Image (cartoon, rainbow, N blue to C red):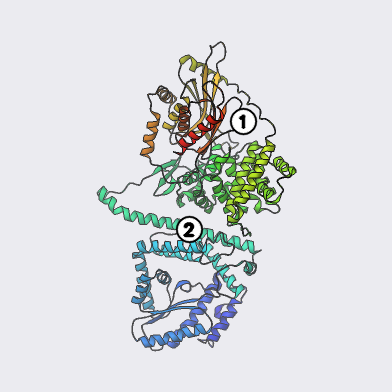
């Protein structure tokens, strides 16, 4: 039955007739969603038009106008009516009497009414003073009376809005931000306000207003469906409660879900969260575009004056291969080819997060539409870029959301679909499962200096609750998923085992520390057996803290932290029961030995370059992915080798992925002598690699002091000021206790940066210690380096001297 069927002429303008027709319409089970809202609006239109006609007999220059949600023709069962009685300023007494004949029947039915009586000039003046009034008038719709009066007001209000957009839109943005601060984010709340929370119906209306300004427009894909879904939920909420409420309370969610024909309340919340996420992302993109346009308008006249009317040049600053910054966003370089570069989405995301910049909508959509899938397992660069993205701190959230909005995350990690927008019905949890996982990675990025494998910590943070999308114990299910995911993204067998252990036991420490007797030896022994190694225990400790901090303030406290730390110390003592074996000497390859002998004979550095690639793909059309270049350097043992080599590489903008330094004794019959062998894996930051001859020439100059590496690096840093981006945790330098009987091991964990190794090497030289060997690795954006140092006579450093060297090095890196 439609609204036309249920109305009769006899019902006319009588409130009882309208009320009965309205009741029948709302009780029709077959008609819901947009059709019911439109039918309810049409029924109300006809009733109010009849009231107007009956009350305005002989009166001209008057019109009845619907504004706000009613103006858009969207009436929920308990929506209020936003009405404007517009008049030309004639007989005000007659207009006031007409208003009474209109408003009182509405009040008699108990319908909430927001009403006003104004001339067009008064309406425009009020709109100029009150932004909310102006927003309501943007949706003005004629109901009855003088159509020309309504049309004239609509035209004038739209013209005012567009003319005043540079002033009004920042005010609207501020209103949206204030509301979000008060109401929270709809996509994460267990009892959300469908209208006022961020990502709700108010924000959807704000996006319509921005579009009406002609200054910018929202991404339209999925936006109308998201808005419709929230309206459908509000309709069901009104019918379930019988009240005009927008708050989706816990006790009403099952009934609302049933009203909508959904499986359960979790399914309902997930649909609400998905809709809110679409609106929130569209808002972020739209307001960023508004800011860009307004800034461009403000700057353009000055640029024209400076350039003499010429077209201003768009500045594009390189961030990574195929990725540049433009107008405060990360976009693809003109030479980027997503269809040929499957790592580009992760590389662009990592670059954006590290720079603290948003990914442009166009770039994300282009990559989503054209980038080919990553090979399985992933190439090393893809894995490293994922780790860099996860380790970028707070900016990771916005970048991750941009990738997710266009479906790139579930394409990279199909298992993500089961946790996406999944609610957590636990008062301790602040976030949905997927956002909690990203928040855990954000928290873990602050703890990367505490672990030897920050890449494993960050990936474990991303995966630790991945099993919550499956039935049963999520830790058990998560272990299976983590093994599969870790293997697919390219970790080796040992690392896969560690990640699986971390996911399986990510609750072990906090649950044992708070629920078991730590004085009982069997308690500690069982944890040690589950963890298996000191390195895994170290990772699990950091993951436990990151997980708790990302859960919410109630999940972590100094008391819980102290209990967990106590447990970790006890478990560590059990795991340290066996003395570690001395490292096995590594036999040099034929190539390394050849370079060492040549370096001894020439008395200078000798270089060898060899490209590295991934194993060929089984698909003949897929070419191997470049990993970088292996750079072998042999040089006679002398002071300053490490800072010289690392400094030259930094000057040439070579990114060091891994590096090893060790002394090599020359074989017989070559006379006695020691050669330092440096084995590096490097990649060009931009463009192509420099020629080996040029690298060698600069290295010779750095060793003899004629090339001032420090000055060169300082000049470059001054020319390119550090961009605002992720604030990395401070570096940490420690002395590894009892790590070697032949040397003192200094461990450095810091944010990777150009010239970092040069600064470390120079600081160690200033401390007067000899670097016996070094093991350097870059894990995502983190450098994890170990330096085996001795005194000038080749003995381990005394305890106090070792601590002094560590302090001096840390102070140098913090400066």
Q: In the picture shown, does residue 320 fall above or below 15? A: above
The residue that mark 2 highlights is: 282
Q: In the picture shown, does residue 631 fall above or below 166? A: above
Q: Is residue 412 visible?
A: yes
Q: In the picture shown, does residue 207 fall above or below 545? A: below
Residue at 43 percent across and 59 percent down: it is 217
Q: Quadrant of the N terminus?
A: bottom right
Q: In the picture shown, does residue 158 fall above or below 697? A: below
Count numbered badges in the picture: 2
Sequence-wise, the earlier of marks 2 and 1 is 2
Please indicate whether residue 31 sits to the left or right of residue 305 in the image.
right
CA gap, disc 2 and disc 1: 55 Å
Q: Residues within 10 Å of mark 2 (few under 14, many from 20)?
A: many
Name, please, the residue furthest toward the front.
Answer: 800
Q: Residue 384: image x %, image y %?
A: 54, 39
Instruction: From the viewer's side, name the closer residue of 309 and 477.
Output: 477
User: Please, what secondary structure does the residue beneath circle 1 have?
Assistant: loop
Instruction: From the viewer's side, name the closer residue of 335 and 294.
Output: 294
Q: Residue 540: which quarter of the image?
A: top right
Q: Residues within 10 Å of mark 1 (few under 14, many from 20)?
A: few
Q: Residue 386: image x %, image y %?
A: 54, 43
Q: Is residue 689 visible?
A: no
The answer to whether mark 2 and mark 1 are in CB contact below 8 A is no
Instruction: From the viewer's side, name the closer residue of 214 and 732.
Output: 732
The residue that mark 1 highlights is: 738
User: Please, what secondary structure does the residue beneath circle 2 have?
Assistant: helix
Q: Quadrant of the C terminus?
A: top left
């Amino acid at each position: 039955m439609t609204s036309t069927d249920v109305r009769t002429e006899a019902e006319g303008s009588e409130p009882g007739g309208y009320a009965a027709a309205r009741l029948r319409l709302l009780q029709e089970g077959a008609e819901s969603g947009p059709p019911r809202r439109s039918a309810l609006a049409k029924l109300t239109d006809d009733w109010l038009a009849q009231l107007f006609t009956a009350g305005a007999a002989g009166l001209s220059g008057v019109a009845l106008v619907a504004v706000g949600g009613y103006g858009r023709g969207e009436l929920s069962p308990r929506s209020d009516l936003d009405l404007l009685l517009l008049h030309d300023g004639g007989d005000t007494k007659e207009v006031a009497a007409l208003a009474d004949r209109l408003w009182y029947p509405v009040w008699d039915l108990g319908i909430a009414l927001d009403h006003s009586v104004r001339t067009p000039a008064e309406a425009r003046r009020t709109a100029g003073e009150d932004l909310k009034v102006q927003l309501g008038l943007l949706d003005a719709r004629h109901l009855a009376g003088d159509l020309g009066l309504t049309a004239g007001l609509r035209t004038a209000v739209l013209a005012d809005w567009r003319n005043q957009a540079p002033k009004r839109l920042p005010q609207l943005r501020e209103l949206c931000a204030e509301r979000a601060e008060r109401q929270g984010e709809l996509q994460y709340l267990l009892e959300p306000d469908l209208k006022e929370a961020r990502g709700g119906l108010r924000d959807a209306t704000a996006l319509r207003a921005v579009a009406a300004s002609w200054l910018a427009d929202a991404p339209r894909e999925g936006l109308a469906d998201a808005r419709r879904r929230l309206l459908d939920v509000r309709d069901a909420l009104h019918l379930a409660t019988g009240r005009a409420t927008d708050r989706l309370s816990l006790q009403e969610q099952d009934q609302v879900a049933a009203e909508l024909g959904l499986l359960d309340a979790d399914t309902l919340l997930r649909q609400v969260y998905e809709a809110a996420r679409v609106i929130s992302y569209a808002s972020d993109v739209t307001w960023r575009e508004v800011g860009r346009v307004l800034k461009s308008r403000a700057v353009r006249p000055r640029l024209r004056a400076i350039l003499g009317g010429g077209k201003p040049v768009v500045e594009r600053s390189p961030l990574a291969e195929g990725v540049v910054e433009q107008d405060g966003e990360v976009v693809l370089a003109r030479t980027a080819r997503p269809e040929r570069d499957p790592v580009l989405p992760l590389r662009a995301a990592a670059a954006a997060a590290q720079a603290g910049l948003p990914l442009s909508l166009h770039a994300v959509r282009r990559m989503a539409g054209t980038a080919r899938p990553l090979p399985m397992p992933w190439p090393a660069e893809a894995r490293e870029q994922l780790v860099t993205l996860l380790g970028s701190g707070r900016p990771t959230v916005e970048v991750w959301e941009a990738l997710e909005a266009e479906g790139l995350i579930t394409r990279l990690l199909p298992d993500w679909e089961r946790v996406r927008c999944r609610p957590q019905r636990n008062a301790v949890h602040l976030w949905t499962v997927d956002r909690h996982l990203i928040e855990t990675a954000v928290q873990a990025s602050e703890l990367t200096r505490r672990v030897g494998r920050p890449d494993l910590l960050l990936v474990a943070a991303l995966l630790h609750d991945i099993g919550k999308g499956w039935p049963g114990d999520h830790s058990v299910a998560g272990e299976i998923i983590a093994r599969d995911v870790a293997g697919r993204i390219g970790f080796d067998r040992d690392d896969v085992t560690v990640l699986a252990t971390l996911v399986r036991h990510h609750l072990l420490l906090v649950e044992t520390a708070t629920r078991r007797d730590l004085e009982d030896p069997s308690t500690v022994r069982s944890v040690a057996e589950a963890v298996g190694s000191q390195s895994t225990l170290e990772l699990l400790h950091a993951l436990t803290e990151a997980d708790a901090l990302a859960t919410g303030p109630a999940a972590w406290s100094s008391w819980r932290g102290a209990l967990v730390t106590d447990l970790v110390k006890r478990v560590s003592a059990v795991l340290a029961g066996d003395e570690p074996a001395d490292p096995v000497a590594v036999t040099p390859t034929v190539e390394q030995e050849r370079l060492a002998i040549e370096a001894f004979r020439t008395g200078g550095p000798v270089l060898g370059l060899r490209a590295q690639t991934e194993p060929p793909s089984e698909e003949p059309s897929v070419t191997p992915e470049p990993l970088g270049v292996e750079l072998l350097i042999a040089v006679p043992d002398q002071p300053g080798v490490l800072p010289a080599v690392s400094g030259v590489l930094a000057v040439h903008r070579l990114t060091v992925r891994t590096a090893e330094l060790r002394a090599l004794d020359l074989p017989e019959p070559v006379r006695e002598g020691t050669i330092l062998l440096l084995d590096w894996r490097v990649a060009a930051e931009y463009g192509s690699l420099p020629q080996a001859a040029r690298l060698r020439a600069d290295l010779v100059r750095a060793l003899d002091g004629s090339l001032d590496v420090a000055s060169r690096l300082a000049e470059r840093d001054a020319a390119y000021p550090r961009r605002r981006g992720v604030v990395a945790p401070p570096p940490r330098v420690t002395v590894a206790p009892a790590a070697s009987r032949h040397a003192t091991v200094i461990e450095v964990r810091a944010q990777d940066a150009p010239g970092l190794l040069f600064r470390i090497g120079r600081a160690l030289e200033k401390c007067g210690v000899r670097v016996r060997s070094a093991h350097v690795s870059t894990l995502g954006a983190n450098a994890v380096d170990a330096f085996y140092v001795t005194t000038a006579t080749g003995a381990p450093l005394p305890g106090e001297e070792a601590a002094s060297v560590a302090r001096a090095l840390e102070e140098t890196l913090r400066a």
